[in-house]
Amino acid sequence: MKTLIRRLGGVALVLAVVYSCASIGHLEGGPIDEDPPRFVEGTPAPGSLNNGKRKRISITFDEYIKLDNPGEKIVISPPQQQQPEVKASSKKVIINLEDTLKANTTYTIDFGDAIQDNNESNPLEGFTYTFSTGDRLDTMVVSGTVLNASNLEPVKGMQVGLHANLEDSAFTKLPFERVGRTDSRGRFAIRGVAPGKYRIYALQDADQNYAFTQPAEAIAFHDSLIVPAWERRTRMDTLWRDTLTIDTVMAVEYTHYLPDDILLRAFKEKVSSQRLARSERLTPKEFSLYFTAPADSLPLLKGLNFDETDAFIIEQTTGRNDTLHYWIKDSLVYQIDTLQMSLTYLYTDSLKQLVPRTDTLRLVSKQRPKTEKELKKEQEEKEKERKRREEKGEPPLVETDFLTVDVYAPNSMDVYDYITLTFAEPLAGMNDTAIHLRHQVDSLWEDIPFTIERDTLDHKVYNFLPGVDWEYGGSYSFEADSTAFHGLYGLFTDKIKKEFKVKTPEEYGAIFFNVTGADSTAFVELLDEKDVVVRTVPVTDGKADFYFLNPGKYGARLVQDTNGNGEWDTGDFARKVQPEEVFYYWQVLELKENFELTQTWIIKDRPLDEQKPDDLKKQKPDEDKKNRNRNRN
């Protein structure tokens, strides 16, 4: 009987285990952990003094932790020339400093939000660890924001550093003395600062030496000296009895550090060093030269195995002689497998002077021409196809190669727009009698005059402008015969026909800005939802007016065009020239059909870091991304 009971008990136990594994029910795991790790202890102790030899820092927390992107988020000040070892182990963060510790110096380790609990990834925000190698702990903090000078985007991951040496050369020759790094909002805080006077700079440090030594590095500098200070402030803290009931509201004094509103506008200087960056020949009929900076004149090209006289059509697609495309006119030249030439151009020498330099180039086409065997096989296949069609009584296959052309003539044409043709190669000729622009009047199509303008930079682009204004709501047709356009290499375009209607006034809206605080040379750029320029107008008598706008959402950016050249200009550190100022209208405007919006715009009515609308920013705050991911999960 006992044996039977044991067996039955064993069977029951097995069935219970199987049922618990296979049954579907509610898993009660308790509330999700949303608390970050909590600091327990550290070695050396936080805030300790006279720690002149211990280069290993161990910090313990109350739960298992991990580090999120420590190389980017953890900032050690003074900056370390040798990369320190930073790792998470169980409930600890271990840091091994490789540099020799400086005497009488406060060391701060700013973790940002790199420390997270191991399970739910809850970050410990703003955790900073501090100790001193001397008998004093420096506690001052300076903080602010770094924005891209051209578009007021927050700049993430940029170093911001201080120099007590007030000479300009300190930024280019010495590493920062204290350093911080910008977060996803462009905000930075430099901690452990001693009383004194400082210069402050921002640096996108490509070579990780904490100094501005590479011309291509983005930088920012402040015109005024930074003097750290502090003051006592009071805040109201609320104690809650439960989630709905307030227990006590207390006034709490705390120390606030200044300045806390430093604004740095980051920019890249113009590269002034002139050299030939690269040359390439993608097809037998064209080769390109790319220079690192604009030039006042074209380079001098001399053919070594061909005659360069009137041999090319040259495109200057940027208009600055830094990107040049050479289209070879003579078939005897472009059939040469390797073009050999000498190229004389202005080159920046070691003394930063422009001097003539001559290089020898050998340009081989990357597009391999067909071999005689391949051409013969292709011809045989065509002959075989011709005989097959002949035997079956099918019409012969007509093969015609046409010059490729892209026609811009939208079905719904804007009243200010025009027709544009972009060809695959430069034209050798054009028969304008074979081109027609017609307007439908009642049921008849009538020819209207037009003008043809070749683009001044890209010789493959031609604009066709009506000789009279488009008629609102009018129907038009653009037509070209197959003999109208003749390409440089013998091909003609196929027939072209595009019909379109011009929009009516009721399909448009308008935006008018009344601008206060702008220079007489300022201009306003109207932007789409992606912060891309749609149209530009000058500020005239305090007004920037945009007519004939399609319905949609628009932003606006104003440029204080100091030199009046019609474009935004960057800064120059050596000459202490800041980049031209940029301001944003503070909101995105939604424009509807047949509406007019009039907006008052005082360009300095709010700080720069509060001007650009969030909808236009590409650099989104990390916490917003985390919230979106959490909601998706």
Image (spheres, helix red, strand yellow):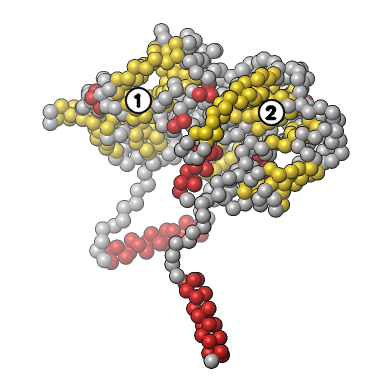
Residue 531 shows up from this direction? yes
Amino acid, disc 1: Ile
Residue 190: image tag: 2
Q: Secondary structure at mark 2?
A: strand
- Residue 319: where, in percent of width, then height? 52, 25
Give the number of the mark in front: 1 or 2: 2
Amino acid, disc 2: Ile
Above or below — where is 565 with respect to 178? above
Q: Residue at x 64, y 45 (%)?
A: 37
Q: Nearer the viewer, residue 532 or 24?
A: 24
Dot 1 alpha-carbon crowd within 10 angstroms: few under 14, some 14 to 19, many 20 or more: few
Q: For marks 1 and 2, give the CA distance.
A: 60 Å
- Residue 8: where, in percent of width, then height? 51, 85
Q: Horizontally, is 51 left or right of 65 in the view?
A: right
Kindly identify which residue carries mark 1: 452
- Residue 421: where, in percent of width, then height? 37, 33
Above or below — where is 98 with respect to 308? below
Q: Nearer the viewer, residue 581 or 563?
A: 581
- Residue 370: where, in percent of width, then height? 51, 53
Dot 2 alpha-carbon crowd within 10 angstroms: few under 14, some 14 to 19, many 20 or more: many
Q: Residue at x 48, y 40 (%)?
A: 243
Upstream in sequence: badge 1 or badge 2: 2
Q: Are marks 1 and 2 in contact (CB under 8 Å)?
A: no
Quarter of the figure with residue 86: top right
